[in-house]
Image: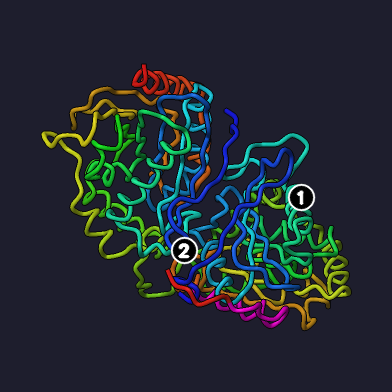
């Protein structure tokens, strides 16, 4: 893996209430370049699903790009803290990195709920210049339904099961499913998403979307995305990959390598590479 | 249970750096080093280890948690993780606890698969005063075969349209050929002597190995061995706190 085997400088940063939140800062200082900030994906510790945050840190450090991965309150090693939630903790991380002179521009995001954190941080904070959304927000809409019906037409054995599910949904089943999704995710409404993306584009925020087969329950067709986000989704500052052969948490090596390569290409294209570190090897 | 104060630190050298977290306790004579489970069970168990360490710490025991080189927040790649590397990491962790806390006695609490490299650690008797095995994997070969079967199922479920996805990963993590060979050859069984006085912490009574002391886990203790998901490994019950308190008493008795 590119970046592996090199000497990577990593230090701890404590922040938040009583400095009880801890993160790992990777890579050497590289001037004005933004830093990639990676909160937890759900309950997975800050090393990331199958350690992908560490692999990103190693990979990016080799290109002179800094990363900061940390545990949100109640996740990984962090205590639950009164008065601060995931949104506040993400903001506290950015404030800390800025106050320490580590960075004053940020790219925030990650897998699943970490993508939600990135989106919200970009809405909240003008210092956020990039968002990484790996299986982030999207809305179903007509293209989703069309795709699902088209898929079903090719599988007549499943028609009766489909009819049963539709009947169950009409009696409240779909609302139940939506509530489950809502409990785990922190999404804007579709109209809010349109306005928020337009505002981000207006202030030159770059966005990196990846959707995998792991979110087939809400994304089945690329055309859903313009419907979800509006015309802003066609802007050159939006990069989107739809990897139907990939799973939600990037289990196998080939999907993680693909992710690392695509993220690096996007980051360097949007913000430029940092200063290459010394070629010391472990 | 709450998460108590702890401080992060790096063990080793910049070129071979292991992540660690110290739950400090002033004036203690006994401390605990926690060797986490292996592969997918390591992140799944993270929260439970933090909370168990916090509870032991409340009872006056300094605890040091760490990630093996090439795993978790430590440096390096997973391919460099094998039993010899784990033994080096155990050396580092025990020395760090002694140096930072000034303890005379150390209990190594090895969780699940970590029990196997802990059992074969050549320096165990010299470095630790007791080896506490938390639901240990007793037969590496059987465990490895079970993981390979689960891994095949995971791959078929995640990549149904690909005939084969070949890589060195197991349960989502890189594994070196040496690691697999070490694991396949590892076994904990009597009459082989324990490398140090051994304690068994398990939910089932088992006479598979001779141990000095047994602690019985409640049925609702978190499990780390039932797939990839993390939710079922997160929660500690009141009954489990009681068991951890018993373990704390046994640890403290070593310094009496």
B162 left or right, relative to B207: right
Q: Which residues are magenta?
A: A257-276
Q: Main secondary structure of the magenta part?
A: helix
Pick the quarter of the image with the N terminus of chain B.
top right
Find the residue positioned furthest to the left.
Answer: B191
* Residue that carries the numbered disc 1 in the rendered image: A92
* Residue that carries the numbered disc 2 in the rendered image: A251
Residue B121: tell me if it is visible. yes
How many marks are shown on the rendered structure? 2
Please state which of the two labelled residues, at mark 2 or mark 1, is closer to the viewer: 1
Q: Are marks 2 and 1 on the same chain?
A: yes
Query: Hey, which quadrant is residue A36 in on the image?
Result: bottom right
Which element type, helix, strand or loop, lies under badge 2? loop
Label pair 2/1, CB-CB below 8 angstroms? no
Above or below for B104 versus B113? above
Residue B255 inside the magenta-drawn segment? no
Measured in 3D between alpha carbons, the distance from the residue under mark 2 to the one under mark 1, in whole angstroms, is 31 Å
Place of residue A265 in the rendered image (x, y in percent of width and height, measured from the top left):
62, 81
Place of residue B31 in the rendered image (x, y in percent of width and height, measured from the top left):
42, 30
């Amino acid at each position: 893996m590119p970046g592996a085997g090199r000497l990577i400088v990593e230090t701890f940063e404590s922040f938040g209430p009583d400095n009880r939140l801890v993160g790992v800062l990777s890579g050497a200082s590289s001037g004005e370049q933004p830093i990639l900030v990676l909160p937890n994906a759900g309950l997975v510790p800050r090393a990331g699903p199958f350690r992908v945050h560490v692999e990103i840190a190693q990979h990016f450090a080799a290109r002179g790009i800094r990363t900061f991965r940390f545990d949100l309150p109640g996740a990984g090693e962090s205590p639950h803290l009164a008065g601060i939630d995931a949104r506040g903790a993400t903001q506290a991380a950015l404030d800390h990195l800025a106050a320490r002179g580590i960075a004053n521009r940020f790219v925030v995001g990650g897998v699943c709920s970490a993508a939600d954190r990135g989106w919200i941080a970009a809405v909240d904070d003008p210092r956020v210049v990039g968002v990484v959304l790996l299986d982030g927000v999207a809305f179903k809409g007509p293209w989703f339904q069309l795709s699902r019906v088209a898929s079903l037409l090719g599988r007549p054995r499943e028609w009766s099961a489909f009819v049963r599910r539709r009947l169950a949904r009409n009696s409240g089943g779909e609302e139940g499913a939506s509530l489950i999704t809502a409990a785990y995710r922190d999404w804007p409404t579709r109209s809010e998403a349109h306005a928020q993306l337009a505002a981000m584009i207006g202030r030159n925020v770059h966005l990196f979307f990846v959707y995998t087969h792991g979110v087939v329950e809400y994304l089945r067709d690329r055309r859903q995305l313009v419907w979800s986000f509006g015309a802003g989704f066609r802007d050159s500052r939006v990069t989107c990959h739809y990897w139907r052969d990939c799973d939600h948490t990037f289990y196998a090596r080939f999907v993680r390598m693909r992710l690392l390569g695509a993220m690096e290409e996007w980051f360097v294209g949007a913000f430029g590479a940092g200063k290459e570190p010394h070629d010391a090897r472990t | 249970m709450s998460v108590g104060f702890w401080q992060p630190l790096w063990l080793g050298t910049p070129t071979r750096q292991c992540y660690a977290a110290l739950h400090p306790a002033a004036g203690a004579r006994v401390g605990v080093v926690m060797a986490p489970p292996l592969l997918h069970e390591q992140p799944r168990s993270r929260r439970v280890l933090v909370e168990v360490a916090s509870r032991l710490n409340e009872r006056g025991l300094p605890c040091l948690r760490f990630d093996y080189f090439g795993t978790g927040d430590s440096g390096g790649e997973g391919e460099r993780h094998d039993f010899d590397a784990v033994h080096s990491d155990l050396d580092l962790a025990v020395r760090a606890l002694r140096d930072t806390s000034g303890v005379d006695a150390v209990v190594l609490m090895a969780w699940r698969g970590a029990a196997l490299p802990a059992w074969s650690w050549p320096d165990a008797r010299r470095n630790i005063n007791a080896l506490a095995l938390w639901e240990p994997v007793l037969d590496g070969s059987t465990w490895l075969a079970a993981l390979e079967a689960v891994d095949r199922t995971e791959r078929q479920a995640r990549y149904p349209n690909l005939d084969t996805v070949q890589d060195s990963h197991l349960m989502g993590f890189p594994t070196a050929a040496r690691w697999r060979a070490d694991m396949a050859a590892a076994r904990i069984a009597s009459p082989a002597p324990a490398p140090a006085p051994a304690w068994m912490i398990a939910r089932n009574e088992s006479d598979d190995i001779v141990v000095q002391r047994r602690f019985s886990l409640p049925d609702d203790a978190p499990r780390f061995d039932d797939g990839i998901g993390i939710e079922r490994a997160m929660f500690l019950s009141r009954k489990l706190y009681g068991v951890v308190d018993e373990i704390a008493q046994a640890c403290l008795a070593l310094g009496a």
